Amino acid sequence: MERLDKAALNALQPPDFRSESSLASTLKTLLFFTALMITVPIGLYFTTKSYIFEGALGMSNRDSYFYAAIVAVVAVHVVLALFLYVAWNEGSRQWREGKQD
């Protein structure tokens, strides 16, 4: 019976606002890196293809497609690595703050 009363009291407590701000922060981070994941590789692909490989280096159209695709793939990996770094540090920061409370 006591367990049920404690469970009922726990259900009536106000929500933890720190977890809501943490959720908002996580969502902002995810949306930011989603936008980066879409724009950076596509932008680098067309920029390097037109201006660097065809313009400055004078490569053929076929070769410039190949090398621009490599640049885009590298950009995807860089953005993904940055996301993992930020997510790891954000998680460890939240863990430290939770541990101190």
Image (cartoon, grey):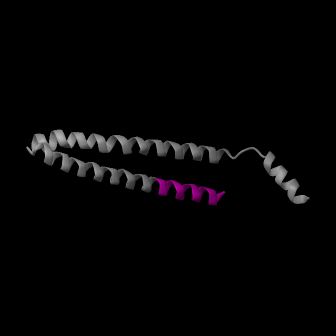
What is the quadrant of the N terminus in the image? Answer: bottom right
Reply above or below: 46 against 96. Answer: above
State which quarter of the image contains the C terminus: bottom right
The location of residue 21, given as percent across then percent down, is 60, 44
Q: Along the line of sight, which residue is nearer the eye, 99 or 33? A: 33
At a point 17% along the width and 39% down the height, the residue shown is: 50
Residue situated furthest right in the rendering? 1
Q: How many marks?
A: 0
Q: Look at the image and give the residue range highlighted in magenta.
A: 87-101
Q: Percent position (x, y) of residue 73?
A: 29, 52
Query: For the view shown, which residue lies furthest in the left direction?
Result: 58
- Residue occupying image coordinates x 42% and y 45%: 33
89 magenta-colored: yes
Q: Nearer the viewer, residue 8 or 62?
A: 62
Q: Is residue 52 magenta?
A: no
Work out whether 74 lies above or below 14. Answer: below
Q: Position of residue 17 (x, y in %)?
A: 66, 44
Residue at the spot x=28%, y=40% of the render?
Answer: 43
Residue nearer the viewer, 88 or 98: 88
Percent position of residue 45, x then y: 25, 43
